[in-house]
Image (cartoon, rainbow, N blue to C red):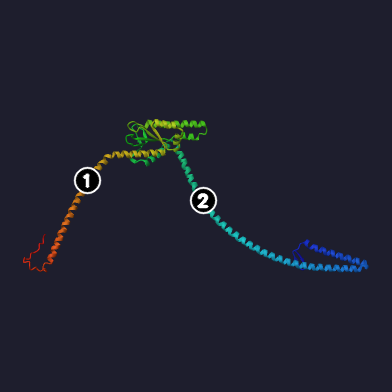
Amino acid sequence: MIRLFGQDYPWTAPEILIPAAALLVLLLLLFAIFRAASRASSNAAPLLREVAWLSHKVQAMGDSQERLSGGLSHVAEAQAKSQSAMLHLMENRLAEVQRRMTEQLQGTSVRTARSLGELHQRLQTIDKAQENIEKLSGNVLSLQDILSNKQTRGAFGEIQLHDIVQKALPSDSYRMQATLSNGRRADCLIHLPHPPGPIVIDAKFPLEAYEALRRADNPRAVQEANVQLRAAVRAHLRAIADRYIIEGETADGALMFLPSEAVYAELHGNFPEVIREGFGLKVWIVSPTTCMATLTTMRAVLKDARMREQAGAIRKELSLLYGDVERLGARVENLDRHFGQAAKDIEEIKISTDKATKRARRLDNFDFEELAPADPSPVLMPRLID
């Protein structure tokens, strides 16, 4: 900013130095001209003309400078107005931006609070799920502890077998932990009719051999585990055949219950010779699913046997029912005959009532009738009884 002629102008130093330099050049020219005029008086007239011309030019330059100053002042005023309008516009824009930023920040804070609330709820859900997972892991560890012991594993299979039998058969058609004549105790004895007779279901769980097979990571380990599982299942099959198939007391066969679908599938998928050996010993291997299907078939057999046992009682009851129906038919006929006789009696009563009504009507008109002159017969009383 430069102050010139009592006013401030937004000029820079290079912009003001150019007119100043021009004015300085003119003054130097005037000084040179006057100096030359003092030395050469013979050339005074041209020099005077030159000076007049130069003075005229200087005056013109002064007028141009004044006009330039007026234009610059107008430009300064316009620039000041433009700056004021720009400042006002910038203030409005800043206020609008500030308002929008405030609204966006408020909306963002609300959404953030909502998101934090939802995140808190999800964290609570995750905490509950974590607690359930911890409980489930504890239960899994407990189940592993149970299955690691042969006695507890046998109890696990017996409980599962009892639950399946209880759901499939009536309570009087089986007995758990039944003792046979040879002193052996069967896990479950189902009282089927002869034939085939009572059949034994015994729970077995060759878990160690199966886990060894699952853990095997090389061909040799797999082969050893296969041998171990095959030997364990064959031992169970022979034990069941020797202990629970008694001629004249039990059926000519028994069931071996495996409380694991995975072990059952492994045997049927990779050990068919073991399954065939069980068929030869008349010991059939069943899983929880196939055991339920087998017990459903046994339930139908028990129902058919009980119906045959009750066939004589049913025929006796049917005979008595037939006699009751015959007596009922005879009594209905008697009742129908009585109803017919009553209807006939009612019809005769109606006839007698009509006759009595007619005679009563004639008696009511008897005193007002005149005897015919040609009829000398005495007046007779009408008969009241037909």
- Quadrant of the drawing holding the N terminus: bottom right
- Residue 39 vertical placement versus 256 (above, below): below
Which residue is found at the position 30% from the left and 40% from the top? 307
Drawn side of residue 296 relative to residue 219, left or right: left
- Residue 226 vertical placement versus 80 (above, below): above
Q: Depth-wise, is mark 2 or mark 1 nearer the camera?
A: 1
Q: Residues within 10 Å of mark 2 (few under 14, many from 20)?
A: few
Amino acid bearing label 1: Glu
Q: Looking at the picture, how far across and down is residue 193, in whole percent?
A: 32, 36
Amino acid bearing label 2: Arg
* Nearer to the camera, 183 or 186: 186
The answer for how far apart the CA atoms under marks 2 and 1 are is 78 Å
Which residue is found at the position 51% from the left and 31% from the top? 219
Q: Looking at the picture, how far across and down is residue 328, in whole percent?
A: 22, 47
* Nearer to the camera, 236 or 282: 282
Find residue 274 and report its image quarter. top left
Do the residues bearing badges 2 and 1 touch, measured as CB atoms within 8 Å? no
Drawn side of residue 374 relative to residue 130, left or right: left
Q: Looking at the picture, how far across and down is residue 37, in whole percent?
A: 91, 67
- Residue 348 vertical placement versus 295 (above, below): below
| Numbered badge on residue 229 | none
Find residue 38 and report its image quarter. bottom right
* Nearer to the camera, 137 or 364: 364
Residue ID for mark 1: 326
Q: How many labels does the image show?
A: 2
Residue ID for mark 2: 122
First along the sequence among labels 2 and 1:
2
Q: Is mark 1 on a helix, strand or loop?
A: helix
Drawn side of residue 336 relative to residue 379, left or right: right
